[in-house]
Amino acid sequence: GAVVSQHPSWVICKSGTSVKIECRSLDFQATTMFWYRQFPKQSLMLMATSNEGSKATYEQGVEKDKFLINHASLTLSTLTVTSAHPEDSSFYICSASPTSGRNEQFFGPGTRLTVL
Amino acid sequence: EDKVVQSPLSLVVHEGDTVTLNCSYEVTNFRSLLWYKQEKKAPTFLFMLTSSGIEKKSGRLSSILDKKELFSILNITATQTGDSAVYLCAHQIQGAQKLVFGQGTRLTINP
C-alpha cells in the first residue's frame, strides 16, 4: 500500500517549452502533496505544498508563475514548469500525505528533467 | 530559520563495519525527525522519531533522538554493500506536514 507514481520518469525538452509532471497516489487519497527539487549531489528542497481544491503554498524563492501547481483531485497533483530553461534541469520528486491523518509522506520515484 | 545539518557529508567504509550518521537541527516548534534512505530514485522511509531517548530499530539499523541537545543519530551495524546510499534526515514542525531536509550523508560500503 501507499504507492505514489510520477509521470514521466524522464523528460528532455527544448528551452522555452513547458513540461507537465504528474504525481498520483495510487491506493490512497491525499489532501496534501508536496513538490521537491533535487540538484545533483544535493538534498531535497521543498518547492511548494499542494492542497486539493486550493492554491498551492510556495516556498520562499520559488516562482509560482514559473512552477504551476494544480491539485484538482485527491489522487492527482501536477507541476508544470513553464518556459523551461537549462537551469531548471533537475530531479523533481513529489510526495503525498494520506487524508486519513497519518503523519507520513510517501514519495514518488521522481522525474528527471533535462532542458536543452 | 529552521535547518537540519548532517555529518559527515560523505563516508566510505568496508563491509562489516559499523557506522554512525549524525543529524543536528534547529527548529522553532519541533514535531518529529525522520530518516530516509535514497538510492537512485525517491527516498524510502526508515524512521520517525518524536520522543527523546527511545531507540527505534529495524534489523541492523537503529536511531535515537535527543531533544535536549537537538540531534539524532542513525546507526548501521554489520554494513553491507546494499547499504550504500544517501541517508537523509528531515524535521517536521508542529502544525505543518512539510519536511525540511538536511544535506544528506553519502555512505559507500566497499566489499
Image: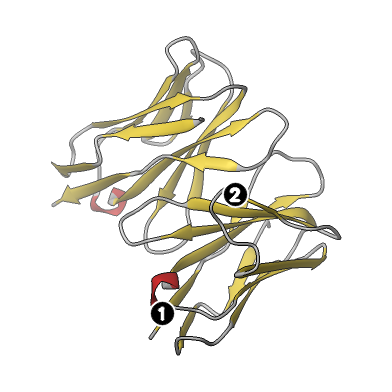
| Label 1 sits on residue | A114
Amino acid type assigned to the residue bearing label 2 in the image: Glu
Q: Is residue A115 above or below residue A2?
A: below
Q: Left or right: B13 with respect to B105?
A: left
Question: Which quadrant holds residue A47?
Answer: bottom right
Kindly identify which chain the residue marked by label 1 belongs to: A
Q: What's the coloring here? A: secondary structure
* Nearest to N terminus: mark 2 or mark 1: 2
Question: Which residue extends farthest right?
Answer: A53
Disc number placed over residue A59 in the picture, else none: 2
Q: Left or right: B71 with respect to A68?
A: left
Q: Is residue B45 above or below residue B62?
A: below
Taking depth in this image into account, of A82 and A47 the one nearest to the observer is: A82
Label 2 environment density (alpha carbons within 10 Å; few <14, some 14–19, many ≥20):
few
Amino acid type assigned to the residue bearing label 1 in the image: Thr
* Residue A99 drawn at (x, y percent): 81, 49
Question: Which quadrant holds residue B98?
Answer: top right
**Residue under the point 24% across and 35% down:** B8
Count of marks, rendered view: 2
Q: Is residue B69 above or below residue A114?
A: above
